[in-house]
Image: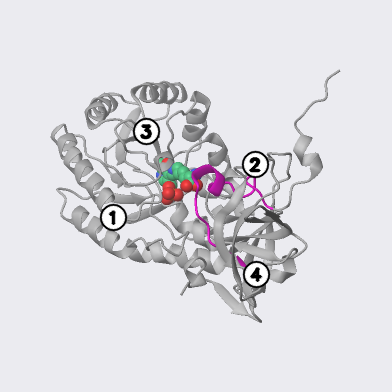
Amino acid sequence: MINLKDFLPSLNIKDRKIFVENFDLENLKKETPIFVYSKEAIDYFINKVKNAFKDYDTKIFYAVKANSNINILKIYKENDIGFDTVSKGELFRVLKVEKDLENTIFSGVGKREDEIEYALKNNILAINVESFSELKTTLKVAQKLNKIANISIRVNPEVNPKTHPYIATALKKSKFGVSFKDALLMYKLAKKEKYLNPIGIHFHIGSQIFEKEPFLEALDKTLEFIKVLKKENIILDFIDIGGGWGVKYSPNDPLFPLEDFAKKVINKLKNFEYKLKLFVEPGRYLIANTAIMLTKILYIKKNEDKTFYICDAGMNDFPRPSLYQAYHYIEPLYQNKEDIEIVDIVGPICESGDFLAKDREIKKCQEGDLLVCFSAGAYTMSMASNYNSRPRAKEILVKKDKHIVIRKRETLEDLICREILGD
Ligand code: LLP
């Protein structure tokens, strides 16, 4: 038996329809495609993470790339959560809800000089350095600004997280982080330089990982390395163990054992040679299962032996199925249907790769019916595009039976507002 609350804890079924909290999605039937976030669900996941780590000095940094809407960021800020960022654009967004970047870390393999400058000028908590060259650039910018740069170094602990190759980041051949050998040289250089202050260490081994073992293996390897640093008189303030905790997209997905994982991590840190603060950077875990996308079936088409539900949302709105062959659970809004059929749920975009679900068993629908696409909070709107010149969807945030608009639907004019018609 599928429990829809696994995909959205604040979901209710009333009058044989799906409600987000007490908000009737039928109200949105003329507004599809649309993203609907639930404040109650956002709070639920914040509390879950906070509780899991409550017995240790832990700071949570929300990975902005998962969903960067400033209203979402504001909720995390109000809950004392910091931000994990990877671009000047994300730093800019954080500065819309925070007065400076004292609760923000800046990661990414290719930071430009102007981005590092922007981060330092706004008092970034730490720049997470990913290469020797970047360390030198950071030093140069810090000297120019006459400002000490707090840095951490992203190490690659070389563990196999057993996930989709596009979202595994700690394999030996990955572009992310540096080996422990290189990291040692980088820390030694940083310690010598007046303008660099090495305060932390970081790893992020990949995303959508359900087992705790790869994380714990990475943690063990990194703690061993911190002992080596200590022998060099390099004492760190924090260890940042990244994000990547798996979330439920399909009824077959397990639940990530967060509480057990947190206990094991805390235990290792409590038994370590000296006190390190713990930083975690969940993105998807905090936001994926707090939202749905509502789409309308425009047409039902049968070709040979296949049935297609052609929807008004496509891969530009909901890109994960096309990009990663990702599974997202989909259910008709109206819960009064009986017969089952197997269909491809597709968008209107001119590409065969434009689908929301393939060969999916679903309760038989009719043209005009609404579909609820679950786990739509993470890497959906933040990866949405204007492909096929389609304006991006509207987003609303539900609180009980009320809602606020957190992003207006784009207009046709928005599509061309940066273009200049030449002679
Ligand atoms: N920290 C760092 C340094 C990261 O690179 C990422 C994600 C995170 C934290 C957050 O990971 P999460 O907890 O959300 O898994 N677009 C892909 C996911 C790419 C993730 C990139 N890095 C997807 O839709 O599956």
Are discs 2 and 1 less than 8 Å apart at CB? Answer: no
Screen quadrant of the C terminus:
top right
Is 316 inside the magenta-drawn segment? yes
Q: Nearer the viewer, mark 2 or mark 3?
A: 2
Q: How far, Cα to Cα, is label 4 from label 1?
A: 35 Å
Q: Nearer the viewer, residue 176 or 210?
A: 210
Which amino acid type corresponds to the residue marked 2 in the rendered image?
Ser
Q: Secondary structure at mark 1?
A: loop
Q: Furthest residue to the right?
A: 423
Q: Residues within 10 Å of mark 1 (few under 14, many from 20)?
A: some
Crowd band around label 3 with a 10 angstrom C-alpha radius: few (<14), some (14–19), many (20+): many
For discs 3 and 4, the disc positioned in front in the rendered view: 4
Q: Quadrant of residue 174?
A: top left
Q: CA distance from mark 2 to mark 1?
A: 34 Å
Residue 327, given in percent of the width and then of the height, sits at: 50, 54
**Three-letter code for the amino acid on which mark 4 is drawn:** Leu
Which of the labelled discs sits on residue 212, or is there none? 1
Q: Position of residue 311 (x, y in %)?
A: 69, 55
Q: Is the CB of mark 1 within 8 Å of ligand 1?
A: no
Q: Of the two numbered discs 2 and 1 on the same chain, state the one appearing first in sequence.
A: 1
Which range is magenta?
A: 313-333
Query: Which comes sooner in the sequence, label 2 or label 3?
Result: 3
- Relative to 159, is 62 above or below? below
Residue hosting label 2? 385
Residue marked by disc 3: 176
Q: Specify few, some or many for label 4: CA neighbours under 10 Å numbering under 14, 14-19, or 20 or more.
A: many
Q: What's the CA distance linking mark 4 and mark 2? A: 25 Å
Residue 412 falls in which quadrant of the image? top right
**Residue type beneath disc 3:** Phe
- Whole-percent x, y for residue 421 in the image: 83, 25
